[in-house]
Image (cartoon, rainbow, N blue to C red):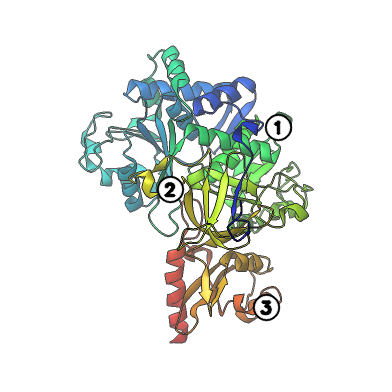
Amino acid sequence: MTSTAGQELSIVSGPPLSDEPGLGSLTLPGFLREVTSLYADREALVFRTAAEDVRWTYSELWENAVDVACALRAIGIGKDARVGVLMTNRPEWISAFFGISLAGGVAVALSTFSTPEELEYLLQASSIAVLLFERTVLKTDFTSVLSQLVPEIETTPPGALESDRFPFLRYLATVGDASAGVDSWDAFLARGRGEPHEVILATAAAVLPSDTGALFFSSGSTSKPKGILSAHRGIAIQMWRFRRVCEFGPDDYLRCWSANGYFWSGNFVMSLGATLAAGGCLVLQPTFAPTEALELMAAERVNYPFAWPHQWAQIEAAPNWLTVDLSSMRFADVKTPIARHPTVSAEWHLPDHAYGNTETFTISTIFPLNTPPEVHANSWGVPLPGVTIKIVDPVTRCVVPRGTSGEICVKGPTLMLGYIGTPLAETLDEEGFFPTGDDGYLDELGRLFWNGRLTDIIKTGGANVSPLEVDEALTAHQNVKVAKTIGLPHETLGEVVVACVVPRDGAHAQAEEIQGYLRQRLASYKVPRHVLFFADDDLKLTGSDKIRSDELRELAARRLRSQIV
């Protein structure tokens, strides 16, 4: 497509979805039935704690999901009813998520990092009828939290709850010790023992790819999380798709460990979805702890680990880092510390030249495994099958010429059904594109380059600075464990570039030395005027372990004011 002036415009489409190889059933029940039939006797998950060692085959995963579906049907859950899952990565999370879909319901994935205030918001916004939760997560007793939010629980038999604050919530069940008004997990499953499995199978078969499959929440790094409804088709496509782009197969015998919760859509797809689609095994750790993670990966011969950069830094700093045997690692990204471990010889590249959002249930653009640098050019990929990307001027909303930065807009087969509480017409543009709020551009070959959030782009002295570019340069420094670059108001420059750094353990990082390092790698206007040092605990994280930008800006502003005074 060209403009009237003959310039090629920033709009590009991937091949038709019908041309995409490797797609299986496009509903969650269909996906589960397909993989559990293909890999029936294989180990699907491992859950090791001091108290238990749980191992399910794929057949047992199916049976446990059916048991959940029967229990939900027995308490009145049917088509489109919303069921909340508030748990860490454990077997019951997986059986609950798929069991809800087998019963025709909508799984609502809730963050276990939620504060009481945040959980109140999530419960009200999601309108769940049933809450399946884990009683104790780290220091949080969710039964106590819920009793404060819904005091009626303590005086109401399980299944008969009526609350003015949460008018749709009727039933709660917990993994862990039950209390008044809450069923134990065993009691919950016992409710479904009289339900005929034939009805569950019929219910699962009646689910359509276009039906609502799940409700995930955005990270909430700058505001309250948004509830995002996704169709079965979108979720299933991405699970099959990530297996394909990674070139995972049954003969790889994936054993996947992840540091992050499955209530984050990216982790759900890249860890849980891709692993099950390839007939692999999920090695579950309920909450991230670096020392225990290394022991678990060694003991269970994990070959596909998944974590965020700051978590890799914590793993590398763990006291047992050099004493564990990680020689089983095969799909360990060469850019992560684990690939540098003395027992690891992997030379694998995670397909990370990719762009996506929770609203598209992850990836919209990507380059497949082992794409050479001269092809990907450090871009964020090209559109996947069925996906169209366009770049528009944030003010005029007109499509800009190739190479010009603007707002990234996307549409395709995995695009959300909508935000809860918001008409779709207020979310999509007149052509059905989702305006992402991200800044980027398309080059002449149709490759997408992402510059960061439009609201995060730093405008200093008339120039635009991408925090992402500065962060990448910072994290390459030997003394930097975590970095987050922000812009703060400045009287004459508009904004000033500020680097917020968590040094590596034992490192003696100096602001002047880091600035000098960056001057050798970045244009002078991109080099932070200020480098502020923080401890790990200073950086507040969202449920998907993203740094909360708004809180960091306030913290950095206070730190600078105190230094000036």
Q: Is residue 320 above or below residue 142?
A: below
Mark 2 crowd level (few <14, some 14–19, many ≥20, 10 Å Cα) = few
Q: Alpha-carbon distance for marks 2 and 3?
A: 44 Å
Q: Is residue 321 left or right of residue 97?
A: right
**Residue 293 image point, x, y percent:** 61, 47
**Residue 9 image point, x, y percent:** 60, 56
**Residue 76 image point, x, y percent:** 31, 23
Q: Is residue 290 left or right of residue 151?
A: right
Instruction: Return the mark for residue 249.
Output: 1
Q: Residue furthest front?
A: 4
Instruction: Return the mark for residue 519.
Output: 3
Q: Is residue 143 above or below residue 233?
A: below
Give the labeled residue for mark 2. Answer: 430
Q: Amino acid at mark 3?
A: Arg
Mark 1 crowd level (few <14, some 14–19, many ≥20, 10 Å Cα) = some
Q: Alpha-carbon distance for marks 3 and 1?
A: 45 Å
Q: Element under label 3?
A: helix
Q: Is residue 255 above or below residue 460?
A: above
